[in-house]
Structures are given as C-alpha cells and as structure tokens.
Image (cartoon, rainbow, N blue to C red):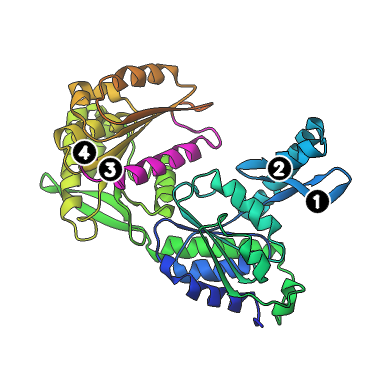
Amino acid sequence: MFRDRKEAGRLLAEKLRRYEDDPNGLVLAIPRGGIPVAYEVADRLHLPLDVIVIKKIGFPGNEEFAIGAAGRDGVYINRHVTEAYGVSEDYIKAQVQARQKEVQERYRLFRGEDRPPPVQGKNVIVIDDGIATGATCRMALTLLKRQNPHELIVATPVAPPDTAAQFEGLADSFVCITQPELFTAIGQFYVDFSQVDESTARGLLKKIEEKLRTRHAPQAVDIPIDNQATHGILTLPEAPLGLVIFAHGSGSGRFSPRNQSVAKYLNRNGLATLLIDLLTEDEEREDMQTGRLRFDIPFLAKRLKQITAWAQTAEATQDLPLGYFGASTGAAAALIAAAEDPAPIRAVVSRGGRPDLAGDAMDKVRAPVLLIVGGNDPAVIDLNLDASTHLHVKKALQIIPGATHLFEEPGTLDQVATLSAQWFIDCFNLSPAG
C-alpha cells in the first residue's frame, strides 16, 4: 500500500535514478492522477515535466471500444478494426476533429499557451499513478513514437503482471514498483486516493518549472573588451550540452525580449546561453546618436570573437561546445566570426538574418548553418536564398509561415526556438570534425 501519490512518486524516483540530471530527460504525466506522482519524479531527478493528453476515439455506438486515439501531435486509427467493421471515413473524421479539440482545450487548461518541450531525441518517461488495462498508455506511446524519442520509458507505482507484459516491445523499458496478481482497481493500493483537482495539477506543473528555472538562475557577467567591459547574462542549466552565444541585431542587446524568449527555451532543453551586448555603454550612447557601430559588421564580428575567446577560458564554459545565434545584422557578424575563427564554433543559427552582409566570409564558414526567415519577409527570404548558395557546409533554410521580420506573430517565435534548439543539440552531439 502507498500512503498517497506523493509517496508513490518518491519511491518511483528511486527506481529511475539513472535519469537524474539527464539533459535529454523529459517526464510526461497522464493527467490528472499521474501528475502528483510525476511531479515527485521530476523534482527528485531535476527533469522538466509536462502532461500528455490522449482522447480515445470510440467505436460507433460503443464509446468504450477504442478504434483510435487523438493527441496534441497526432492521431492513431486502428485500420484493421475500422476496415473490418466498415466504420465510415466521415465518422472517423468527425471524431478526430472533436477529440483533437478536446485535447487542445485540456492542454490550455493545464499549460496555458506555453509551447511543449520537444520529444525528438529525448529520453521520455511516461508516468501514471497506476496502470490497469494499459489502453491509454499504449495509445500515448504509439503517438509518441512518431516523434522519434531516443528512449521511451513507462513508469508506474502499480500494475498487474499481464498489463506489464503488454509493454514489451512497445516501450524501451517498463518500471513498476509492485505487480500484484490480485488486482481489482488502482485505488486499492493507496491509503489516500482522493481525486486530483485541476487547480492542484496546474500548480504542480508551474512549481516544477519554477524550480528548474531558479536552480541555475541567470547571472550577470562582465567581459573585458578593448580595455573596457561589456555586459552579459549567462544561464547555465544542469550539465549543459553546449553554450549558445547570442549576437543581437542592430540597436538591440542582452535585454531583447525576443532573444530572451528563445534563450529560455534553449535553457529548458539543456543548453547554456550567453546574451551579450556587443557594444560597451559608452559605445551604445554614441551609437544612439549616430547609428554608426550597429551596422559596422566587421567591428561587431571582432567583438563576437573576443567574447568567444572569453567563453573558451571562463571556468564555467571553457569545456562546452560553442554555437552562435544571430539576429538581423548580428547574424552577419556571427557568420564572419565563425568563418575567421572556425575551430571552436560548432553551429550557427540565423533568425531573420542578413547573411548577405557577411560577404566573402560565407564561403569560409565551416560550422553547420540554419537560416530561419519569416514567410512574410520576401526581401530577406531572397537574400537568404542567394547567400545560402555560398555555404559549403551542412545547411538548412526554414521559412516560418505567416511570420514577418521580427517574428511578432503568435506562435512564430516558438517555432524559431524549437528549430534552433534541435539544430544546436544535433550539431553539438557531432564530433568536432563532424
């Protein structure tokens, strides 16, 4: 017997200790009962926590008989059943639309408008407070597999042996504290199995997010440059996969809300970030009047190289793979810096960038380059298309539909963050020569 879900989660965390501080770890709770259990696991292992909402698609006239499922990132239909029983496509389409709407409403209830962490390449631990038949969990795994996780783990305090056997081959591992032969209902194994209300569930999700954010809070750093100092914000998550240095666009700096938003997403996915002013305070005051320095791309590239040299010697970052995230004119500076000092730079991302301003340096860049442009920014799309022909490395051009130059439209900056995180993670996992 477990005293409550909290105790069950603490005991389950001990069985999952190998994932502690895993930079690729992600805990997904099946709401609502799975959330308090998953919270204890995520808290003790220092892993991000989210929910996975699955809505069953029932057979016509018998909703309990599942013919498929809908989730946030996909739909599964058991075609063997639907074809054998002649279930119409109109019925399936209507059910899919209705269930997907319910799924989105549930996610908004739990997470608001926050974008979920990516599953691709992650070690995903799916948790419920108990598994009886396993139907919901199996459907969740089917949809998760399509997102190409590195490893899928099902973890639960209690399940009958025959249910546990169903996960062989479907999950990479099944972790369970007890598998009793006499199993009637999940609640019989808890002293306190009271219902988890929505307010409590939302509170736990926000609490773990806040704990992860403050565990390694951003720190102010001063970097010596040309006998002066420039200011930055360094954020180091636990066991960072690499360091991303931000090269801001014209007239921008470390407090850029767009780059801060992207940086927070990178932090949540195990990447350290350095938001840095490329100009000193005196230079910024001068530039406010003249606008001269913000468009001096070689000068900004020189500054970026000096900052990179600092990162290579600072105790907290000296052993980390390095990448650049450049916006607007900052992207051109990042490409020049990567070309002139190619050895330490493992990846470059350009958001709404002006790679054309990098000139001949484009032919010398040796780091993989991701160019991200708004779909409603035609002039910059053309500039990026032309500039990309001068890149002789791994490269990609991603156009975000509906986005203008500053990516101010709802959801567009989230797409930038997701694409950037995956690019840096993939490139940092390559060998230096790769």
Neighbor class of circle 1 (other Cα within 10 Å; few <14, some 14-19, many 20+) is few
How far apart are the alpha carbons under marks 4 and 1?
69 Å
First in sequence: mark 4 or mark 3?
Answer: 4
Please determine whether, in this image, residue 36 is positioned above or below residue 86. Answer: below
**Disc nearest the viewer among 4 and 2:** 2
Q: Nearer the viewer, mark 1 or mark 3?
A: 1
- Residue highlighted by disc 3: 323
The residue that mark 2 highlights is 78
Q: Earlier in the sequence, mark 4 or mark 2?
A: 2
Q: Amino acid at mark 1?
A: Phe
Residue 114 visible from this viewpoint: no
Q: Is residue 434 visible?
A: yes
Distance of label 4 from label 3 (alpha carbons) = 25 Å
The residue range painted magenta reads: 406-434
Question: Upstream in the sequence, badge 1 or badge 3?
Answer: 1
Dot 2 or dot 3, earlier in sequence: 2
Estimate the spatial distance between the alpha carbons at disc 2 and disc 3, rounded to whole Å.
44 Å
Give the Cα separation between the discs numbered 1 and 3.
Answer: 50 Å
433 falls in the magenta region: yes
**Numbered badge on residue 365:** none
Q: Secondary structure at mark 4?
A: helix
Q: Amino acid at mark 4?
A: Glu
Q: Identify the residue position indicated by label 4 in the image.
A: 283
Depth check: give the residue in front, 384 or 168: 168
Q: Tell me if residue 149 is in the magenta stretch.
A: no
To which quarter of the image does residue 298 belong? top left
Q: Are marks 4 and 3 in contact (CB under 8 Å)?
A: no
- 68 or 272: nearer the viewer: 68
Q: Which residue is labeled 1 in the image?
A: 65
- Residue 304's x, y, as percent? 21, 40
